[in-house]
Amino acid sequence: MVIMWIMFIFMFILIIISLSIIWMDFMKMLITIEFSFLIMIFILMFGGMMISDSLIIFLMVMGASESVFTLTLLMLQGKYKYSNMKLKFITW
């Protein structure tokens, strides 16, 4: 279990370093990290790995909070707007 946590931390450090090396925008970096959370949840739930439920719950909560945080920042920057009761993306 400790090795799995070390592996996750190492993977996130590699993701952040690789995204900052290619000079990716901060918002694109947050969206990419959010998708990596969702991909990890998918792999862990359907990959047949024997893991604890607390790790799954932690990743689900982190993925949900990351998506809410990203959407809030995009709305504050004016890149999302409401029109006809739908949330539309204006510019990347």
Image (spheres, rainbow, N blue to C red):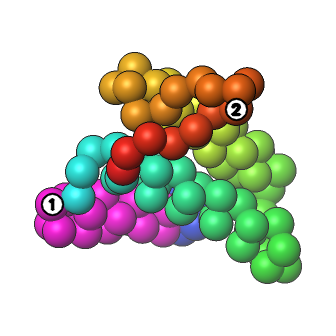
Residue that badge 2 annotates: 86
> Residue 1 at what x, y percent from top left?
64, 62
What is the magenta range? 7-23
CA gap between label 2 and label 1 equals: 31 Å
Q: From this view, report whether residue 78 is shown above or below residue 36.
A: above
What is the number of the mark on residue 23? 1
The residue furthest bottom is 47
Quadrant of the rendered image containing residue 62: top right
- Position of 34 with respect to 26 (left or right) is right
The 10 Å Cα crowd at callout 2, few under 14, some 14 to 19, many 20 or more, is few
Q: From this view, report whether residue 81 is shown above or below residue 58.
A: above
- Position of 65 with respect to 26 (left or right) is right
Secondary structure found at label 1: loop
What is the number of the mark on residue 55? none
Q: Say if the magenta span includes residue 14.
A: yes
- Position of 55 with respect to 66 (left or right) is right
Q: From this view, report whether residue 91 is shown above or below residue 37.
A: above
**First-in-chain label (2 vs 1):** 1
Quadrant of the rendered image containing residue 73: top left
Q: Give the residue at x 72% y 73%.
A: 43
Which secondary structure is most common in the magenta stretch? helix
